[in-house]
Image (cartoon, rainbow, N blue to C red):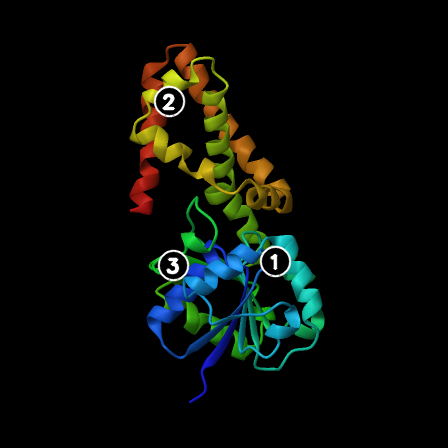
Amino acid sequence: MAKIKVGIVGLGLMGGSLSLALKKHSKDYYFVGLDHNELHCSDALKLGLVDEICTSIDGLKSCDIIFLSIPVDGIISVTKQLGSLNDTCTVIDLGSTKEKISLSIPSEIRDNFVAAHPMTGTEKFGPTAALEDLYTDKVVVLCDLEKSGMHQQNVAKKLFTDIGMNIVCMGAKEHDKHAAFISHMPHAVSYALANSVMAQEASKSIIALAGGGFKDMSRIAKSSPNMWEDIFRQNKTNVLEAINSFQSELKKCEKMVENEEWEALNDWMKEANTLHDILD
């Protein structure tokens, strides 16, 4: 029985982890990788993330499934280079913003395409950061699914279910608004927290006191600046709305502390506690 040929464009954390997850689930996959970073290519081969490397988009057109695990602008560029594809080929992007991608897919391959966002990741990047359980028990959002062919819908759903993900479907516009609050804005806050400490004259002394809370909140500030610049740019309007909302709440806290409104502050914090009643 012929193996399912899977192309992965972008051999970093997300693409590499996807390969490991699929390999863990089944031996029926054969992986072809493409990455403009030669070190990523050699590392991916050494680590067994892919079976071979190709040097152009044309080398992926014979694949049954093509994953695009690169920044949003790159995803849009690649889709325009793919040209016509076999009716059974499924192209799945893993971009962190969805509306611009969904609206940019050439009509000739729109049936082939599934816009997906796995809600997972770490602050690390590159092939060496790949984890076989990165996707396990995490949510994957499939966007504008009605625009995808039925075969492609079924392939994507089965694949993500096979690696242990929980599927949520919504419109791309809705996704970008929600993702700004639960993913994009928290990264902005983490970068701001890190920079606010580093700007202090006694930053080294402050960092010496850092405990679990500070490390947890600042951890994602280690994430790739290039990747997050791209995300903030692509989702600018929603990110600004989320940041403004956060600033409004922080201002409430500031005023209550300044005016010594301790009971009101306590109620404000209790209200925040209820978030984890929902999450848990």
* Disc 1 from disc 2: Cα separation: 37 Å
Using the rendered image of the protein, determine whether residue 199 is visible from the camera's viewpoint: yes
Identify which amino acid the numbered label 2 is placed on: Ile
Question: What x and y, as percent, mark residue 212?
Answer: 30, 31
Residue at position x 33%, y 25% from top? Answer: 210
* Disc 2 from disc 3: Cα separation: 32 Å
Residue at position x 44%, y 39% from top? Answer: 220
Of 88 and 52, nearer the camera is 52
Residue at position x 35%, y 60% from top? Answer: 132
Residue 89 figure quarter: bottom right
Of 43 and 82, nearer the camera is 43
Mark before the other along the chain sequence, 3 or 1: 1
Using the rendered image of the protein, determine whether residue 141 is visible from the camera's viewpoint: no
Horizontally, is 24 left or right of 13 in the view? Answer: left
Which element is circle 1 on? Answer: loop
Pointer 3 residue: 135
The image shows residue 170, relative to residue 157, as above or below, that is: above
Give the crowd class for mark 3: few <14, some 14-19, many >=20 residues within 10 Å.
many
* Disc 3 from disc 1: Cα separation: 24 Å
Identify which amino acid the numbered label 1 is placed on: His
Which element is circle 3 on? Answer: loop
* Marks 3 and 1 in Cβ contact (< 8 Å): no
- Frontmost of labels 1 and 2 is 1
Pointer 2 residue: 207
Residue 27 figure quarter: bottom left
The image shows residue 212, relative to residue 7, as above or below, that is: above
Q: Which mark is residue 36?
A: 1
Which element is circle 2 on? Answer: helix
Residue at position x 45%, y 82% from top? Answer: 3
- Frontmost of labels 2 and 3 is 2
